[in-house]
Image: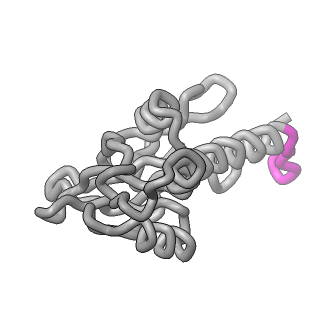
Amino acid sequence: YYNKGNKYTNDLLKIGIDVTKSGEKDFLGKINVEKLMIPTIDFVSYKATFKELTEKLVTSLLGVLVVLDKNEVYSGIVSINDVRQNLLTDNFTDLLIADDIKQKIPIIYMDEKVSKALKVIEKFNIDCIPVADRETNEIEGILTHQNITHAYYTHIEEWEADQFLIDYDKK
């Protein structure tokens, strides 16, 4: 029996992450957020009307808008779920602006670990978190729960399959 590894596990091993049976169990704690974030971001002004938010969210790739304050600094996010909730509970949606319905979600930095981002996502019960550059503090992307889950399960599937591979050239 010989476990030769695969491209994914070998690449991880090259950067110091051992995901073999005896290796790292929390491989998400070894991966920087930058590796999994989506660099496509939709921004909106804090003054955007409810109608503008709705129109922009419908065409948004992720269904999330990053809200910028009057100084064009991150102040929160608005998701399609926030708009839906306000449609169901508020009779005055025509009077709402982005600043009224945004969620003040903390940012995570590109050089922080995915496991930390996952803890924030779970703590705030959100689907995604804005990712910022530590030096400029500007939002550079979005990290989604779905991306983290996909990376995790891809790793697990490859690891499980790899456990049964035999290198016949070595025999």
Image label count? 0
Residue 25, compared with residue 42, is above or below; it is above
x 40%, y 39%: residue: 113
x 20%, y 50%: residue: 134
Relative depth, front residue between 147 and 5: 147
| Residue 35 appears in the figure | no
Is 65 one of the magenta-colored residues? Answer: no
The magenta stretch spans which residues? 164-171
Is 157 on the left-hand or right-hand side of 129? right
x 85%, y 45%: residue: 165
Q: Residue 65: horizontal and vertical position, in percent? A: 41, 62
- Prevailing secondary structure of the magenta residues: loop
Relative depth, front residue between 161 and 77: 77
Is 104 on the left-hand or right-hand side of 150? left
Residue 95, compared with residue 28, is above or below; it is below
Quarter holding the C terminus is top right
Q: Residue 74: horizontal and vertical position, in percent? A: 24, 55
Is 156 on the left-hand or right-hand side of 53? right
Is 52 on the left-hand or right-hand side of 58? left
Quarter holding the N terminus is top right
Relative depth, front residue between 142 and 67: 67
Q: Quadrant of residue 124?
A: top left
Q: How is the image coloured?
A: one colour
Q: Residue furthest front?
A: 91
Residue 13, compared with residue 94, is above or below; it is above
Q: Residue furthest top?
A: 22
Q: Residue 121: horizontal and vertical position, in percent? A: 48, 37
Q: Residue 66: horizontal and vertical position, in percent? A: 36, 60
x 33%, y 51%: residue: 100
| Residue 104 appears in the figure | yes
Q: Quadrant of residue 142?
A: bottom left
